[in-house]
Image (cartoon, rainbow, N blue to C red):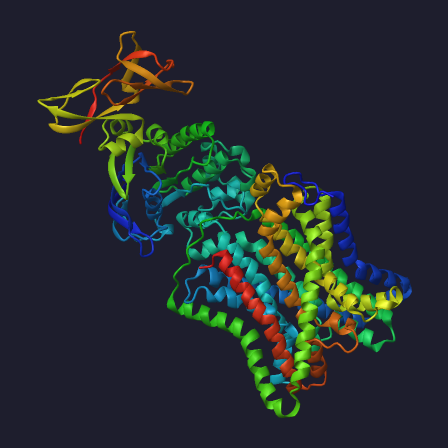
Amino acid sequence: MRQPWGPGTARAPGALLAVAAGVVALAAVPVVHLLLRTAGGGVDRTLGVLLRPRTAEMTLASLSVAALVGAGSLVLGTATAWAVTRWRLPLPRLWPVLAALPLAMPSYVLAFAWRAVDPAVAGMAPLVVVLVLACSPLVTLPTAAALRHADPGPAEAARTLGAGRLRVALTVELPAVAPAALAGALLAALYALSDFGAPATLRQPTLTWGVRAAYEGGLDRHLASVLSVVLVACGAVLVVAERLVRRRAGRRARWQVRAAEPVTVHPLTRAAAVTGLLVVTAVPVVLPVAVLVHRATLARTRSLDVPRVLEGVVATLGLGVTAAVVVTILAYPVAAVAARDARPRGRHLESAAYLSQAVPGIVVGLSLVSFSLTVLPGLYQSSAVLVLAYVVLFLPRAVGATRAALARVPEGPEQVARSLGHGPWRTWAGVTARHAAPGVAAGALLVAITVSKELPATLMLRPTGVETLATSLWGHTANAAYGAAAPYALALVLVAVLPAWALTVATARKEGVR
Amino acid sequence: MSLQVRALTAGYWRGPDVLRGVDLDVGADELVTVLGASGSGKSTLLRVLAGLHPVRSGRVVVAGHDLTHAPPERRGIGLVPQDGALFGHLTVAQNVAYALPRVRGRAAARRHPRVRELLDLVGLADLTDRLPHELSGGQVQRVALARALAPRPRLVALDEPFSALDAALRQELRAHVRRALREAGTPAVLITHDQDEALSVSDRVAVLRDGVVVQSGAPQDVYRAPADTATAVFLGGAVLVPAHASGGTVCTPVGTFACTADGPVVVVLRHEQLEAAPDAHGEGRVVDVEYFGHDCLVHVRVPQGPALVCRRAAPLAPGTPVTVTVRGPVHVLPA
């Protein structure tokens, strides 16, 4: 095996291709199993489920949430990105980091904190608000990056052609970052479609909620399968749309060394921007923490069980780190093929890997429960199946991060290393790996954070007796035991938010945010 | 006068002045080149003219209007940036139509008479519906010029518009831009670091050094009579011979010349003024040859003299004995 193959050859060695294809096939197991099971249920029963008014209602609810959250995140995220990159604000280093932080907050903790304040909160509107607050960084981050790296030349030329600031923003600057913002909004919509915790907490029947209800009801597994297929189909549309838009974004981006100078705005505008940024950050991060601390102190005398919370922390971190390592190792061959193989098969493999983004955690959970029960009974409720679920769920993320890191490795030093007599492996270890390591590590950390927040698949697949912070929190909220749940939520916030903070600060520093 | 710049100073955030009192005039229909090395402040000057960079002191007056503090959109100064900076999501016609009122959509832009006129002017009438990423570098620059000319600006400012192009294309495009500006009757300021470009396209050249215009004038005047030795060398190959002048003449190892100055001076000898002729009894020896095809530079060593460089049609073998003579009047600078 000649992996890593030399730069410029643009052909992955067959063995690497085979490994990458194997990983992608592994990630496709839940979907394939789900489709087989659904097909096995027969056409009549399937049509019967599809044509139930209840199915239509839940589908409509899911699509509405996805559309509203996508649109809301697009507006909020673009506005946030504009303010942090284009306007001269006090503490300029702080805002980009703060703006990214809500991403670390699990949406169900947000929903839970809201209900802890007002147990009557429920339904579509609060759900959309919660998800927009949690998801808008998916738009903010790529849009801010695009704005920061956008060539200021066209905007300047437009000014000299007689266009005022507003017209330049609307006709030149925003169109230039529109693909990046739109791709982010599609991801936000996908998140909203796939989310289980927040709709369940806020009692809004969506498809994910319906899958879980059908599974728990236990009478009709076929119902759960059909609803899952509907969910995956909607998700697949969003994933394909996102990929198409992102490809356009990549084509249009002209990365520029010179950055646009931030503009000094009217003090009132500045005050409004700072207030808005504080609200967008504080409401999804600080407010829930405050509410939880308050509830935890109220409940302390009754039910604070420190050893159990610590057990939860250990279980969460253990699963997070294990999954991150496994996912990153499995993602590497796929990313390497995608980054370096110029042939269409490299692109197809990558696209196939990204398609598993369309599969929500609840569907992965459902499918793997049935898969392990029917195909590999020995593995039912083992950590292996749970880690496989995480691989399916987070492979696209790890592939994306690793691919980006590999794409940034300059070819020159690799070629020089080879010409100086280093073989392919030594070049890989000495040059490629060194350059790509920070990006790959950041991707792994991101996976670990996301795994520690994951709820539905963990809920369905965790080995008996294992409780992560997320599942403990879920158990308590289901009984409306807000006081008892608060310590778990707080621990979860710490486990997720602190590494996210460190990661964003490090990324911001690397990107040279002023 | 189309543009008058007076005692202009400008700088970057808390830094020292980059422009330290620039004076510059551009007449109607004139193409003035601001020639400067990198770091001379020429890009800053252009950005100040376009209104993209704030002024610390001094004045910018265009066609009688004081525009020193006007925002870029109220100046009527068209900008042609270094890389064209076309709007990536708009077609060629839409780019050109950007400044025209009430032109919406591809079809409207394509049909607009002003757009057609300008695309004819820059020779791109058949590329109206292309997107910028489908254009070559030279085409991008021509679209940028048409776009800048569309609203009939008072002045066009060109920021090293040819620097990213290869040599052959650069020469062709220079001539094209020159003709287009002349036909449009629009005065222009072009900044460049390339003295060939400055000398070949402009009506007048202003040499910018360390944030000050050290000399301006017609290309041939600036070339023939540079204000100081640095300008002399920057504008083209020259041999600088230190000498002492007295009584209306200056005596050098390559000849004696008429001179109005007195005391220590520097004689500026352009390479093409120095003629090296093979001569078996000549005191000079060829030490090196740089061959360019259309001509060559012959490096000659003369006893007790400076290292001479002579431009010549045909190369000479190193070691050839030569006599060097000086053609035409020489330029003498105070030392």
Left/right placement of residue B248 relative to residue A269 reads left
Residue A26 locus on image (x, y percent): 78, 57
Q: Quadrant of the C terminus of chain A?
A: bottom left
Residue toward you, A441 or A347:
A441
Left/right placement of residue A11 relative to residue B24 reads right
Q: Is residue B262 visible?
A: yes
Residue A209 locus on image (x, y percent): 75, 73
Q: Which residue: 52% across, 59% down? A: A144
Q: Quadrant of the N terminus of chain A?
A: top right
* Tag count: 0
User: In the orientation shown, which residue stands out farthest toward the front?
Assistant: A421
Work out whether B11 lies above or below B330.
Answer: below
User: In the orientation shown, which residue stands out farthest toward the left?
Assistant: B247
Work out whether A280 lies above or below A298.
Answer: above
Hey, which quadrant is residue A206 in on the image? bottom right
Q: Is residue A133 visible?
A: no
Hey, which quadrant is residue A425 in on the image? top right
Residue toward you, A327 or A241:
A327
Work out whether A173 lies above or below B288.
Answer: below
Residue B236 locus on image (x, y percent): 31, 28
User: In the orientation shown, which residue stands out farthest toward the bottom?
Assistant: A301
Residue A458 locus on image (x, y percent): 74, 71
Hey, which quadrant is residue A24 in on the image? bottom right
Left/right placement of residue B163 relative to residue B324 reads right
Q: Which residue: 68% across, 43% down? A: A341
Residue toward you, B73 or B320:
B320
